[in-house]
Image (tube, rainbow, N blue to C red):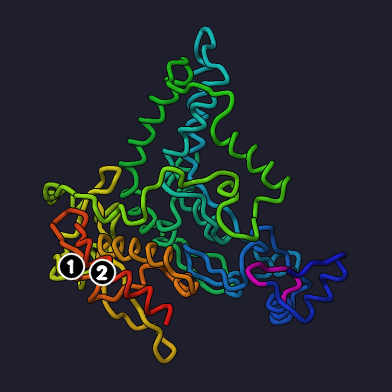
């Protein structure tokens, strides 16, 4: 890790080196841009420094060299701003407005905590870094549309719909596109504002559901982590999570082979709606593989590999078994989550018996071949695999022998 004792030492370093992942007024790119535009010097802000030199704006897609422009002082201005949804601010304002209008103020500190916690749920997008021109385009478009006093903010995606960007210039706003973008966003914005007024009313009249706790689990966790750092256990050189070295995590674990004897009852088939919901929210891979896909190991078709997780949600996953050949990774076969779980459990048993340490080099599920894996399982639709115990025992013994040879 590089460290600097003075600003002068840092400047000397920057003459010959660039800082990876961040930027500076004295980076080679910055100095080249100053020279290119014949500027006095760079005029940048904190977010410019905290982003890499190859950063590009998510709205206008311009890179840093295309964002900079000469300001009125002759400096080369490069600014990145944090763009946020002002709807989050609306909760506070509505809360204050209602509370101040009551004959007797009913709200207290807990009411304020309540609306602060819930405000984030009304925002349409996360806080996002955008260039200063895109951030400015948001309020300019709202001004043109008569929305300046509203709590509405265009999202980064929406800003990109109505701007006409050019290198090293402020954006031109296409009024008609801004108008149509607002028309599309307006119905949902009004619904959000309606909900905000209801929530703000609950907070202002102290009829909310928030109950304060003196010490949340987060506070307890931070305290514990503080003492782990105090004793040098926060990054143990011996690996594993810090706290796991202070207690035994597997006291009640059964034999390593106990997983083989569990009998799993098949679940019902998921409905079309359940599959669509799963694919949209949890398992996008389901949409990205062909409808005629099947697992190369258990031979179940795509739909049959969907299974409920321990939390009761439908789930689907596919993993590639790859091999590094001539400078690139080649896919040998694809297997479903249940086959991968079996491969992982067999790998754990192999590791327990392996005296050579070779099983530690890479993922445990790589230790069993496609053919051997298919031999030890009995598959059913929408269910974990049953295991042929005697075959599994022979396969594990064979792998351990091969590692020792």
Query: First in sequence: mark 2 or mark 1?
Result: 1
Q: Residues within 10 Å of mark 2 (few under 14, many from 20)?
A: many
Q: Residue beneath label 1, please? A: 298
Label 1 CA crowd tier, 10 Å (few <14, some 14–19, many 20+): many
The quadrant the C terminus occupies is: bottom left
> Looking at the picture, how far across and down is residue 173, in whole percent?
46, 61
Residue 212 magenta-highlighted:
no
Label 2 to label 1: alpha-carbon separation? 8 Å
Q: Position of residue 212 (x, y in %)?
A: 53, 22
Q: Which residue is mark 2?
A: 335
User: Which is closer to the viewer, label 2 or label 1?
Assistant: 1
State left or right for residue 404 relative to residue 3: left
Please tell me which residue lies in front, 313 or 299. 299
Q: Which residues are magenta?
A: 20-27
For the point 20% across and 70% down, which residue is it? 374
Say which element carries label 2: strand
372 shown above or below 233: below
Q: Position of residue 313 (x, y in %)?
A: 26, 46
> Residue 26 lies in magenta, yes or no?
yes
Kindly give the residue lying farthest to the top in the view shown: 103
Asked if labels 1 and 2 touch by Cβ distance under 8 angstroms, the answer is: yes
Number of numbered markers: 2
Query: Left or right: where does residue 314 sit relative to residue 25?
Result: left
336 or 399, nearer to the observer = 399
Between residues 78 and 6, which one lies in front from this camera angle? 6
């Amino acid at each position: 890790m590089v460290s600097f004792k003075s600003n002068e030492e840092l400047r000397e370093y920057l003459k010959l080196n660039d800082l990876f992942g961040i930027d500076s007024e004295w980076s080679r790119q910055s100095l080249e841009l100053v020279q290119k535009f014949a500027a006095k010097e760079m005029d940048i802000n904190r977010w410019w420094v905290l982003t890499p030199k190859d950063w590009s704006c998510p709205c206008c897609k311009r890179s840093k060299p295309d964002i900079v422009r000469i300001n009125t002082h002759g400096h080369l201005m490069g600014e990145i701003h944090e763009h946020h949804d002002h709807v989050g601010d609306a909760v506070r304002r509505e809360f204050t407005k209602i509370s101040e209008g009551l004959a007797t103020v009913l709200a207290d500190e807990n009411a304020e905590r309540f609306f602060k916690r819930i405000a984030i749920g009304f925002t349409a997008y996360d806080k996002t870094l955008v260039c200063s021109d895109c951030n400015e385009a948001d309020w300019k478009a709202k001004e043109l549309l008569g929305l300046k006093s509203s709590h509405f903010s265009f999202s980064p995606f929406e800003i990109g719909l109505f701007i006409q960007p050019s290198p090293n210039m402020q954006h031109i706003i296409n009024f008609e596109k801004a108008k149509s973008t607002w028309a599309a966003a307006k119905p949902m914005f009004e619904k959000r504002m309606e909900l905000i007024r209801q929530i703000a009313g609950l907070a202002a009249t102290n009829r909310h559901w928030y109950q304060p706790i003196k010490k949340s689990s987060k506070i307890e966790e931070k305290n514990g982590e503080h003492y782990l750092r105090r004793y040098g256990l926060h990054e143990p050189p011996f690996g594993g999570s810090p706290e796991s070295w202070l207690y035994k995590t597997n006291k009640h674990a059964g034999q390593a082979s106990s997983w083989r004897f569990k009998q799993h009852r098949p679940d019902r088939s998921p409905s079309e709606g359940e599959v669509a919901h799963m694919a949209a929210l949890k398992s996008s891979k389901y949409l990205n593989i062909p409808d005629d896909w099947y697992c190369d190991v258990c031979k179940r078709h795509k739909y049959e590999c969907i299974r409920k997780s321990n939390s009761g949600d439908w789930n689907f996953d596919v993993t590639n078994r790859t091999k590094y050949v001539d400078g690139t990774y080649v896919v040998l076969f694809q297997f479903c989550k249940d086959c991968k779980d079996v491969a992982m459990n067999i790998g754990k048993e192999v590791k327990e018996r392996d005296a050579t340490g070779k099983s530690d080099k890479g993922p445990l599920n790589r230790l069993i071949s496609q053919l051997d894996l298919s031999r030890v399982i009995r598959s059913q639709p929408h269910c974990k695999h049953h295991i042929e115990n005697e075959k599994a025992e022979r396969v594990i013994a064979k792998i351990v022998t091969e590692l020792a040879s």
